[in-house]
Amino acid sequence: MKREPDFQYPQPPASGPAGDSVVIDCHIAELYYNTFKAVRDTAIPVHSNKITALIGPSGCGKSTVLRCFNRMNDLVRGFRFRGHVRFRGMDIYGATIDPVAVRRYIGMVFQQPNPFATSIYNNVAFGLRLNKYRGDLRARVEEALKRAALWDEVKDKLRDSGLSLSGGQQQRLCIARAVATEPEVLLMDEPCSALDPIATRHIEDLMKELKRRYTIAIVTHNLQQARRIADKTAFLYVDTSAGGRTGYLVEYGDSHQIFNNPREKYTQDYIRGEFS
Amino acid sequence: MSAHDAAQNSLRTGLDPFRGINFPELEKSIMRPRTLTSLLLSALVTGMCLLALVPLFSVVWMLLWRGGRKLSLEIFTQLPPAPLETGGGFGNAIVGTLIILALATLISAPVGILSGVFLSQTEKENRFAQAVRFGAKVLTGFPSILAGVFAYGAVVLLTGGFSAVAGAIALAVLMLPTILLTAEEAIRMVPSKMREAAIGMGATPTQTMAMVLLPTALPGILTGLMLAIARGAGETAPLLFTALFSNYWPFQGGNFDLMQPTASMAVLIFNFAGMPFQNQIEMAWAAALVLVLIVLAANIIGQALSRRQIQ
């Protein structure tokens, strides 16, 4: 990944009184995949112990923005961007930063449940083994599974394959795997879009529980979901005026304000479902 | 509404809901072209499948019939008989084949699997990777006798004699492309979401490969390895002027001697089948049967191993 000289970005919009509670502070001036400009002018602060939702239509770059938060975009060839992403004040795209270390602090849960083809126990222990954890592995695995509200369902079959679980259970297993290493931030990329409504509700309750310990940023298609769980919401939209499809931030604020009293016309239309 | 209800209904209203439907048309009839074509084609594909099985079953039948009679404990423990001698066995050829195969696997498996790891991690259009892949594909169809010529020139002439090592190198050349190509394919088949999950957890590329990609791809890699071993077990031509043959055990005083001519099943079959002696010809049949059983056992073990890994 090539990174261009830091971009002087205007100060972020006022984001409430707790300005120092910002865990991730992202300013994307321009983001490209090769010559395709995917995102522009997007600044989203992620606050500690809050759920921040990124909403918007397909192709507005919300997943792309989320994947900047733990440098998952490094895997995409031709990715480059101007701007910065600061994690507790430190620029994670800095030249001396090891992306592998960043991802150990900022965990991720993906759209498709993606447990490894190994036992439930080994799935959860994976991150601990990566970090050469020397303590009581079993206790940590149990703790993580309890936090992901999965323990009671799997405690008698920890040796079974993670792939033998149902979709909703698999997703909770992935959450257990992510929280086992005690990350500071959990990024969730449409974690419920492959799940049925009951499993979705399960995961949502879980997220509200998890935000006591972790900071959560979630991408979702589902406006009701954002309304139900998010403390802060960022609305992104697609700009087709320059011929391409470039996503940008339209409005960011408290969820209550975004959903009940949006300032921008685009947000109002989107919330009311008046978009084609 | 069921057909019965519809009929009841039509009786009441006097309206026939089935007007215009030609019921005999709906029934199966052997005389209709559609049914006939379907029947003929089913018969054709079934027949072709049976035809494809004929060589396999006739060979297995022949082996059991001609080789099974000779099967006894002594053929596993004794040395090959001299002409006109009765009895004897081919214990040294079994041991020799196993030694040569083990050596060949020891050489080709690490090179093949690690090359597969490299190929799977490079871009598809990487020039060097494409060259390696092309080379491996050419090598897959490599005439096996040329592998023997190569090992003769590279090992036999250099070390000054026929040996198990020379034979193993010849077989390794033949086994390598299968192992390499299947390993690459097996690693590429691991869903990318699993790779993403590992990287998202903060795994380094090495950890991702060792803890996620290789274990998940293991069944496929083992399958390729077993295919390669099965092929190596049956090769005769590359061993003829590398390992040659020997009428003696490949160990002396409790130590394996890998640098002397070594017997193998394939060469034993080749030698004995052409002899004008009844005992030797029967021995060749028995050796062929044992060789097939060894390959079968290797396949079953490979499959069992990979199945255990999946769960």
Image: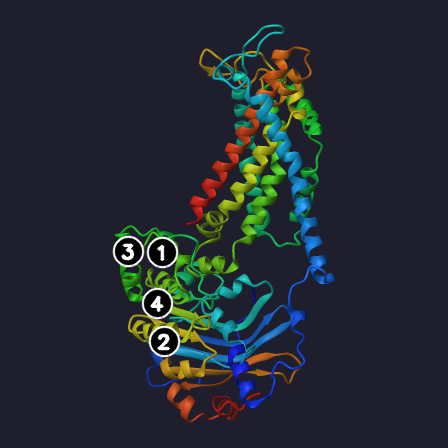
Label 4 sits on what residue type? Glu
Label 2 sits on what residue type? Arg
Residue B82 x, y percent position in the rendering: 60, 7
SS at circle 3: loop
Q: Is residue B289 visible?
A: yes
Task: Give me the C-alpha separation between circle 3 and circle 2.
Answer: 24 Å
Q: Label for residue A120?
A: 1
Residue at position x 55%, y 16% from top?
A: B90
Q: Earlier in the sequence, mark 4 or mark 3?
A: 3
Residue that mark 2 sits on: A201
Judge if badges 2 and 4 mark residues of a common chain: yes
Residue that mark 4 sits on: A184
| Label 2 packing within 10 angstroms: few (<14), some (14-19), many (20+) | some
Mark 1 vs mark 4: in front: 1
User: Furthest residue to the top?
Assistant: B84
Judge if badges 3 and 1 mark residues of a common chain: yes
